[in-house]
Amino acid sequence: MKNLRSIWKGPLGWRSLSHLKALVLHTCPQLTTIFTWNEAFYLINLEELVVEDCPKIESIVVTPDPTATEPRLWRARYLFLKLRKISLHYMTKLVSFSNGLRISPILQWMSFYDCPSLKTLSPEEVHSNELKVIIGGAEWWRELKWNKSEWLQPPNLDAIFHPIEQDTYFITRLAEINDQLRARMQETELSQQSGLGDSLKAPTVHDGTSSKQKQVA
């Protein structure tokens, strides 16, 4: 897609992109904008976003001027309600994902590789109780700074960070981490199902004493 300059043109209708679940962009040297903040709200079912080798992109979501006098309610909203996986690779000018806007309440996976200009993240951008994996270069992670937030403290995410050291093993390492994540999620799901099954078992009653009587006793 070497000649792609924009994802779409003109205003969007409410259901224009409502069925889009995955968006993958590879090698778009002329592309300068992917989403504006108000366009992002139309992607109500987007689950995965992959952007690679798009050297002119500085921010995945272009946001309003923070000094503008317009209402700031949009700052408390999530951009993508169902987005689970973000992969941003070989983005030389990328400096921000969403300039501090909240991305998704169920975000699980964030992968950054060869994004030398991405030196800061905001607590809002990683604010998700479901976040399980952050991938990137070890040196990038050590030097990463957190922007100040009015509402959130800088998170400690070292426990879920997975370093990638060499470009040669990049794709292989991503696949390994993805397999590990799926296995862990399956184990959690089976454990929850087992616990639910145990909780649904009827209590055993002996000697003609009712369950209610045993609880009182």
Image (cartoon, rainbow, N blue to C red):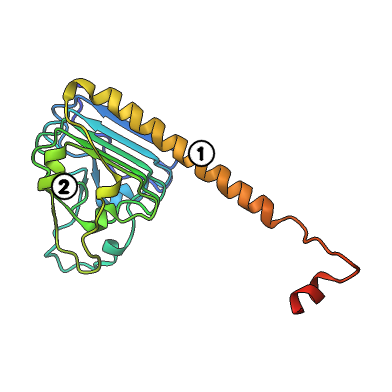
Residue kind at label 2, given as amino acid type = Ser
At mark 2, the secondary structure is loop
Find residue 199 and report its horizontal and vertical position in percent.
67, 57
Q: Residue at x 29, y 56 (%)?
A: 102
Mark 2 is surrounded, within 10 Å at the Cα level, by few (under 14), some (14 to 19) or many (20 or more) other residues, namely many
Q: Which residue is at the front of the view, 16 or 214?
A: 214
Residue 112 image position (x, y, % from top left):
21, 37
Question: Residue drawn at (21%, 50%), measured in percent from left and top?
Answer: 98
Q: Secondary structure at mark 1?
A: helix
Q: Is residue 50 above or below residue 70?
A: above
The answer to which image quadrant residue 139 occupies is: top left
Residue 130, image x, y percentages: 39, 51
Q: Amino acid at mark 1?
A: Gln
Report whether 191 appears left or right of 107: right
Q: In the picture, which quadrant includes the C terminus?
A: bottom right
**Residue 16 seen from this side:** no
Which residue is tagged 1? 186
Mark 2, residue position: 96
Camera sees residue 208: yes
Q: Most extreme residue toward the front, as rendered?
A: 207
Specify whether 176 is left or right of 94: right
